[in-house]
Amino acid sequence: MTKLRRLPLVAICGRPNVGKSTLFNRITGRQSAIVHKEEGITRDRFIVSAAWEGRRFRLVDTGGIVENPLDPITHKMQEQARAALEEATVILFVLDGQQEITRVDEEVCSELFRYGKPVVLAVNKLDNAKLEQNRTEFYSLGLGEPYAISASHNMGIDELMAAVLEHLPALPEGEAIEEPEGEGEASAEEEIITKVAVIGKPNVGKSSFINAILNEERTIVTDIPGTTRDALDIEFTWQDKEYLFIDTAGLRRKAGITREVERYSVARSLRSIRRADVCLIMMDATDGLSEQDKRICEYVRQQGTAMILVWTKWDLIEDKEAKFKSIASEMELKAPFLKYVPYVTISNLTRQRLFSIFEYIDRVAGMARFRVGTGELNRFVESLKQDLPTAMHKGKRAKILYVTQAGVRPTTFVLFVNQKRLFHFSYLRYIENQLREKYGFDGVPLTLEVREEKTERPARGPRTKRTESEEEEA
């Protein structure tokens, strides 16, 4: 099976607001990248696996190339865009067909010549036959055939992608041809990759953690809250194991979200939690456990996703021993529902305990996939019955008839009982605690469903008219 990073890379580039992200979504067939009329929405390199006519490749969306970047974020956006062009197999240069060629377009064109790579010219926003005539003006760039497209209306995309595929290397003999899976499904390739979502409040060090792990500036890092806007998938191999890190936008309180773009970013972050195997919940050790941290942890718990708490900026803590004890006390007092969740302290700057996180990830991901056999589970629950607290109502005693594990992600156990109302939440919490003590389930939320097992009388068939002989026999 071909790994994602071994596939050829198609890089989409151009100045801001020419429709790069819209074309990106059109090619991938899903709303992967955020599309908005505001300039500068795309910042980092956003790479996904895509397929067209049975040919697989990586597709990267880049931030808009500008003439004179002034602020630090825009400057780093330019670095990210050029890093994508350096790595690309084919460059897809997108221009706005409803505007004249600008000086920035010409400068980008000159720069693309220097890379010495195949360039396919896409003239976007040509929504009708009259506008399509504008494409002839773009021959002057000297990049060959300008393909008239409308990414938003799905016009001309087949011809454009046919030109792109001509420049991609041929498939190796015997290579499997597969379409990429949709977001809630897992392909055979994804089954061997542990998906890890890196989440938390703004400015707790999520992107810095990714960069420190990769030992490169793969994602843009600044002191400005909200620098990361999209959820970025980044593959990484550690000790022959495959991981897919998902760098996400910071999760603010609802009252603090004022811009539409930020709402999109938060929605992508929440979706990443649902599709991850493990969530690394980043928290600032200098701030302690905040109410927003607790809300994020509670949301992850409700989704049934396994989690690890990661306290960042440990290099800024002077009395580390006292602080660690303080964290333990704070967790016990403010968030007792997280007592089963492991936590670790790290420093992205000094790289302290940075790679020990993989031991936690492997252990918690293994627990998230762990299943208890029905026979073993019922023997275990049977052994608990003598210690279970007695629950009675109107002379009825609570009875567990049998138990089964219904699934993982979320890890769910179903208890078939005589009467649901007899099972108080404290009764179920005792069972959950015993399951954790027996099997571990470190960092894994457990869901216990209670169902009544009713004994039904056999269905009676329709009455038929008896004959005289049958009446006599009766």
Image (cartoon, rainbow, N blue to C red):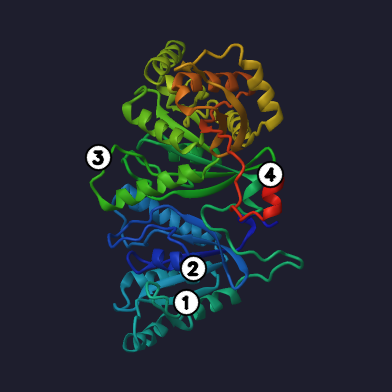
Give how far apart the Cα atoms at labels 3 and 4 are: 81 Å
Disc 3: which residue: 256
Mark 4 and mark 2 lie on one chain; the one further toward the N terminus is 2
Q: Disc number at residue 27? A: 2
What amino acid is at disc 1?
Ile
Front tag of 1 and 4: 4
The residues bearing labels 1 and 3 have C-alpha atoms spaced at a distance of 39 Å
Query: How far separated are the C-alphas under marks 2 and 3?
Result: 34 Å
> For the residue labelled by badge 2, is the local secondary structure a helix, a strand or a loop?
helix
> Which mark is first along the chain, 2 or 1?
2
SS state under label 4: loop
**Residue beneath disc 1:** 157
Q: Which residue is mark 4?
A: 474
Examine the rendered structure and indicate whether residue 443 appears above or below residue 464.
Answer: above
Tell me where residue 362 appears, x and y as whole percent. 62, 33
Q: Is residue 220 visible?
A: no
- The answer to whether mark 1 and mark 3 are in CB contact below 8 A is no
Dot 1 or dot 3: first in sequence order is 1
Q: Residue furthest right?
A: 174
